[in-house]
Amino acid sequence: MSNPVKDAMQRFAINQVLRYLDGNPEENIPKLMELFDKYTPSDWYRPQRDAFRKATKVRKARSICAKRRFLMPNGGNR
């Protein structure tokens, strides 16, 4: 038997997280990962968490490179 109050609280929490991520994903994903690390056992899904962190770092690095290429199409050379 499910608990309607618990279900409603879980839905609310997930919706809040999704709204938070929509605001600024590049800045907020690392913050959520830190929060997750703080309140969950360190061995919980460790390989997945590490892979996720690596993927977000790679994405951020690619984004920075793309912005740099857009702003300086000739690599800064005149």
Image (cartoon, rainbow, N blue to C red):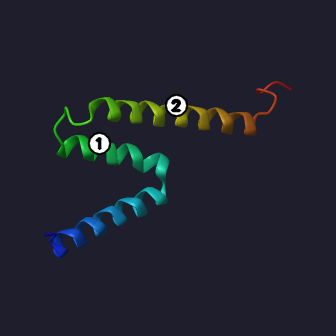
Q: Is residue 66 left or right of residue 77?
A: left
**Farthest residue toward the bottom?**
4
Identify the residue at image location x=47%, y=37%: 56
Q: Position of residue 74 (x, y in %)?
A: 82, 28
Label 2 SS: helix
Instruction: Find the residue positioned furthest to the right.
Output: 78
Separation of marks 2 and 1 at Cα, in angstroms: 18 Å
Q: Quadrant of residue 49?
A: top left
| Quadrant in which residue 64 is drawn | top right
Nearest the eye: 9 or 34: 9
In the image, taking residue 31 as reference, residue 4 lies left or right, namely: left
Residue receiving disc 1: 34
Can you say which quadrant of the picture contains the C terminus?
A: top right
Mark closest to the chain's N terminus, 2 or 1: 1
Q: Residue at x 36, y 66 (%)?
A: 15
Question: Where residue 62 sits in the image (x, y, percent)?
Answer: 60, 33
Q: Which residue is mark 2?
A: 58
As helix, strand or loop, the secondary structure at mark 1 comes to helix
Identify which amino acid the numbered label 1 is placed on: Glu
Name the amino acid, label 2.
Val
Label placed on residue 42: none
**What's the residue at 40%, 47% (across, down)?**
29
Compared with 29, 5 (above or below) is below
Badge 2 crowding class, 10 Å Cα cut-off, few under 14, some 14 to 19, many 20 or more, is few
Q: Position of residue 43 (x, y in %)?
A: 19, 32
Foreground pick, 17 / 64:
17
